[in-house]
Image (cartoon, grey):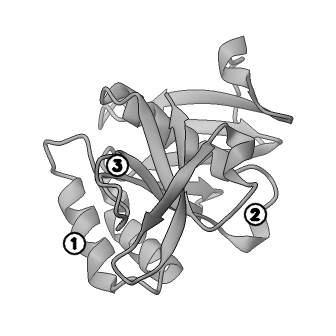
Amino acid sequence: MGLRLPQASRAERYFNFSDFVFEINKFKKLNRKTKVITTFAVLNGYIMKIISVRECPEYMEPAIKFFQQTWKSASPHIYDNCIRHAITSDNPLPQWYLLENQKQIIGCAGLITNDFISRMDLYPWICALYIEKDHRGKSLGALLMEKAKDDARKAGFSHAYLCTDHIGYYEKFGFRYIGQGYHPWNEESRIYAIAL
């Protein structure tokens, strides 16, 4: 493979969420030219590149395209406008992430102030988590959630939230159900929280 993987510390290697355990080795690489540190992860044998679009603005156009294709129910202008402005924002939010495997984008997520939900007293929200169907079942979503949680923690937040209709998935990663929230389009979703 040619890629030398440094040994991760014990704290970085194992995550145990309830009865769900997986091994992750994370390492970072400094681009001396751009001074950007890129996070790579080896999870269950898969080498992934975790990309912050703010830290790597060259990914802006591919990120916009991937989010628009993935979340077709949202107006394409939403992701275009939000991602473009997030890159130069002085605020820690929003953040947009991509997951890349062998130069192919296979997943995405965001960290935002509100996910179109009535609980505006809660933030930040992990949103738009998506892994391509061919790559599901390998816990790859955990990599994006961990990156969002790390950035939320660095920004001084004590909790992160998400809204979903899924039951049983996020609980595996330490999220707990805290109640229902309501969307402007007359639907409701389950709200989950996790301490950082």
Q: Amino acid at mark 2?
A: His
- Label 3, secondary structure: give it: loop
Q: CA distance from mark 3 to mark 1?
A: 17 Å
Q: Residue at x 62, y 42 (%)?
A: 176
The residue labelled by disc 2 is: 135
The residue labelled by disc 1 is: 81
Q: Residues within 10 Å of mark 3 (few under 14, many from 20)?
A: some
Front-lying residue, 32 or 13: 13
Q: Quadrant of residue 183?
A: bottom left
Q: CA distance from mark 2 to mark 1?
A: 28 Å
Circle nearer the N terminus (3, 1): 3
- Label 2, secondary structure: give it: helix
- Is there a contact, CB below 8 Å, between mark 3 and mark 1? no
Q: Is residue 131 toward the left or the right of residue 81 in the image? A: right
Circle nearer the N terminus (3, 2): 3
**Residue 152, x across and y down, in percent:** 38, 35
Q: Residue at x 32, y 57 (%)?
A: 114
**Residue 184, x across and y down, in percent:** 33, 78
The residue labelled by disc 3 is: 56
Q: CA distance from mark 3 to mark 2?
A: 23 Å
- Label 1, secondary structure: give it: helix
Q: Is residue 124 above or below residue 67?
A: above
